[in-house]
Image (cartoon, grey):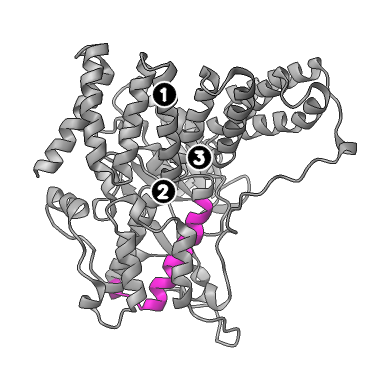
Amino acid sequence: MPEQSRVIAGRYELTAPIKRGGMGEVWRGYDTVLDRDIAVKLIRPQIVASDEDREELVGRFRREARVTAKVEHPGVPAVYDAAFDGTTDQLFIVMQLVHGVSVSDVLAEQGAVSAAWAASIGAQICSVLSYAHAVPIVHRDLKPGNVMIARGGVVKVLDFGIAALLRNDVTKLTSTGRVVGTKPYMSPEQIRNLPVTPQTDLYALGCLLHEMLSGQRAFDAEDEIALMYQHLEEQPRPLRELDPRIPGELEQLVFDLLAKHPADRPENAWVVYDRLSPLLPAIDRTSPDGEQPDGVIPDPTRPYRRPAAPRPRPADRPEAPVPASSVHRVDNAQIEEALAAAESLIDEERFTQASDLLSELLPGASSTFGAESAAVVDLRVRVAAALFLGGDYRRAAPEFDALAVSVAKLDGPDSEEVLDYRRQAVVCRIALGESARALAELESILSAYERVRSDGREYLELRLSLARLRLGVGQDQLAHQELRELSRDARDRLGGTDELTLEIAALLARLQNESDD
């Protein structure tokens, strides 16, 4: 069969290539079952180093595709299908086909755009990020080529989940272990191989806004090492020096977004959206709104002249109590049946269904056995675990918090279970970008470990996590000091050849090289 008409998974006909890259290719296609145009992204499993890594890539691929599909926003192309096609030996994602033009093509064709256009594109990206970060998903590779202006001026952010899927700590993409991302838009924490957070995407947005407003990249060294140094150490040229017509508040916002430490950037996408709002065009339902002819760049201000808005802000509010009349008592047999069903769902990686199934049982179980009973606590543990495994960290974190409080009443605040639940909540908050809260909680957990569990490997791993978190929020000097002490302790307790000892030493050496440069 000719390449232009080959079929994936027995139903997706590939009709024309859209783009190719080192990790795979994107095709325009046709769904022969649902009779619609589609885009198909093909990823070659051969990019990983071994069969074992390949199996892990396939598993991660499925998980990331499921999580990405949870970003329900018009600015994210819908995911229709994701699987591994054994006949072609390729992973594939079937997505909505976007008709429009990329921001990279706009910049190449006309250079800098107006402040109104830049603000409108940036605000729509913030709207998308507000939904993604609430899942939470961090894009990791936001750049002009991954942002499209579609028909009607709607901005689409492409490739969510792909950078996460292909991050080098899991897939070992190359023998040198390169960091996934695009260097002109890569945050300092990505370059330093530190944990990424929602603020990582905000840094890339700052790079993108700078380029849209000035027609020049924020950092543009031709040499890769020099470019990384600019991201780590240098400040971009002020935008108003490049073009005095750029509003001062936009210049300041870009400066804030490009802060070297994530903690110094705006708190989240909602804050950035609010700062862009005064620069957005006013609602104008009387302006011409005819369909633009082919070849004309869609106007990204249109969704604000005919309004769009970001996801509602999250709020900490208690759930409404379940009316007593609607609570059905349950027995042990029903609980055992639900636990078995949930376990099967988790084995199939259907985490949302598993957590929903068990959550529905909780009111009845609490009414029957008591909210603090062993049976109910076990159900709550399974719910929290399913949420965590499914990447729903925003719901998992308070579940782990509540479990720690409940178990502490029975076993004491320093019990092994309590500390484990608190650790899981910290992991969730790091993923959500709540670095300050995670840091304070991790310091508190370490204090508890020092009282009761300071002689184990787990204690050393926690100290390493704390040091990495300090690096991520700009507490470099304290992190260096703690890492030096940790390195000595790890050698004394585990030996110089232990994997953890070597990991700590490698991090110290890299940080020392950075400071020498």
C-alpha separation, residue under disc 3 versus residue under disc 1:
16 Å
Determine the main secondary structure of the stretch shown in magenta.
helix
| Nearer to the camera, 382 or 454 | 454
Three-letter amino acid code of the residue under disc 3: Ala
Residue plotted at (54% across, 32% down): 388
Pick out the residue farthest to the front. 451
At 29% across and 33% down in the image, what residue appears? 173
Q: Secondary structure at mark 3?
A: helix
Q: Which is more N-terminal, label 1 or label 3? A: 1
- Name the residue nearer the viewer: 343 or 83: 343
Quarter of the picture containing the N terminus is top left
Q: Which image quadrant for residue 412? A: top right
| Residue type at numbered disc 2 | His
Residue 34 visible in the current orientation? yes
Compared with residue 275, is residue 72 higher up or lower down, i.e. above or below? Answer: above
Quarter of the picture holding the C terminus? top left
Name the residue: 55% across, 62% down.
310
Q: Residue at left 35%, top 31%?
A: 465
Classify residue 98 as left or right of residue 474: right
* Disc 2 element: loop
Task: Determine whether label 2 and label 1 are within 8 Å by CB.
Answer: no
| Circle nearer the viewer, 3 or 2 | 2
| Residue at which label 1 appears | 55
Whether 206 is drawn above or below 55: the answer is: below
Name the residue beneath numbered marker 2: 139
Distance of mark 3 from mark 2, alpha carbons? 13 Å
Q: Which residue has dot 3 on it?
A: 65
Segment tinted magenta in the rendering: 109-132
Choose top left, top right, bottom left or bottom right for residue 23: top left
SS type, badge 1? helix
Q: Position of residue 293 (x, y in %)?
A: 47, 77
